[in-house]
Amino acid sequence: MSFNEYHSVWVFAEQTNGRLSAVSLELLGKGRDLAGSLNTQLSAVLLGWQMENLAQDLIHYGADKVYLADDPQLSHYMTGSYTTVITKQILESKPEILLFGATDIGRDLAPRVAKRSGVGLTADCTDLAIEKESGLLLSTKPGYGASMMYIFVCAQARPQMATVRPGVMRALEKDAKRTGQIIHVPVRLEASDMPVKIVKRVKEIKKGAKLEEARIIVGAGMGVGSAEKFAVIHQLAEVLGAEIGTTKYPLDEGWITGDRMIGQTGKTVKPQLYVACGISGAIQHISGVWDSDTIVAINTDPRADIFGIADYGIVGDLHEVIPALIEELSKRHT
Ligand code: FAD
């Protein structure tokens, strides 16, 4: 199969309320290397409303071209409309590579675009390179709880697509003298492209630190038992001045809400103290807490895997151990 008509490296430039995401700039930095290796151009794809200034910024951060779809219907991110606009542009311009940040939006949008374009997608990459001999994109991502690194290659379809974790690539310094081309993309959307209507936007006021930046985290697992029994986790978090993180299932069960899942498909954290309560220690979870300075585990099962990585282990029922801990900690504060 020949892909001679496919050229250039594209980066989806994610913006929210007129602010570019950091990972988009990081991808432009990496995109410049990739485009250099392929001797081709680097383009950004920007969707939104009244985004001309951001389009200029993208050029200042390394893009040669910006495909700008500027339309009131695109003012807020919507899966359907964004997928349609990007997919049409792919069909028309035929990029060789298309990159997204592995953000909430990127993780939602990239698979839709890949499916609609009939190509595969390597998700959550931590490195990208071009293979010298073949010119193929080498997309590296960790697997088996980060114990192995895999390199994925897509030889049979174009564009080669990947999402990339925020924070792993480096953005270029802004160069306000850099020039480039802004290409205005016509936006034609049908009602079927926008099956979801935004009725109201409510901004969540986040209390406390982001989980990734938290100094102390109380981790809660299935061993907590129920939504009602979660009170003890909140109490411990309050006494320690900690954020609450969870394994997959307390969130699935609705025992607690929020963006709190730690692990392979959740967040990677590195607190000074991680207190794992009723957590078995599955690799998908502990891959997200390995970098914690100190791990304390509370579990009824002395053979639980979590004790294998814990610095301190308490074998016992968390509903007895935590109240005792809180009492002890409270005494020290009075
Ligand atoms: P369990 O494994 O059920 O463990 C509960 C533990 O609580 C047990 O060890 C038990 O001994 C203990 N316990 C019970 N009662 C008490 C008590 N009263 N006091 C003290 N201890 C008690 N999981 C994640 O967390 N993050 C991810 O990112 C993630 N990604 C996944 C991706 C894939 C593709 C798949 C297939 C799974 C993923 N999972 C993820 C799920 C993961 O495999 C585990 O199933 C999950 O982490 C287990 O959660 P847990 O430890 O809360 O529950």
Image (tube, helix red, strand yellow):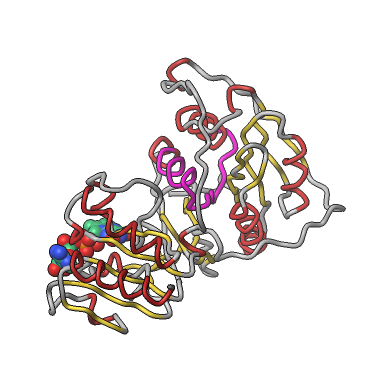
Q: Give left or right: position of 89 versus 279.
A: right
Image x and y of residue 270, in percent: 45, 71
The residue drawn where x is 72% and y is 44% is 65
Q: Residue furthest front?
A: 334
Image x and y of residue 168, in percent: 55, 66
The residue drawn where x is 83% and y is 48% is 179
Q: Give left or right: position of 182 versus 110.
A: right
The residue drawn where x is 53% and y is 33% is 77
Q: Nearer the viewer, residue 210 or 132?
A: 210
Quarter of the figure with residue 45: top right
Q: Residue 107 colored magenta?
A: yes
Magenta-highlighted residues = 91-112
Quarter of the figure with residue 108: top left
Quarter of the figure with residue 298: bottom left
Quarter of the rendered structure image containing ligand 1: bottom left
The residue drawn where x is 76% and y is 62% is 173
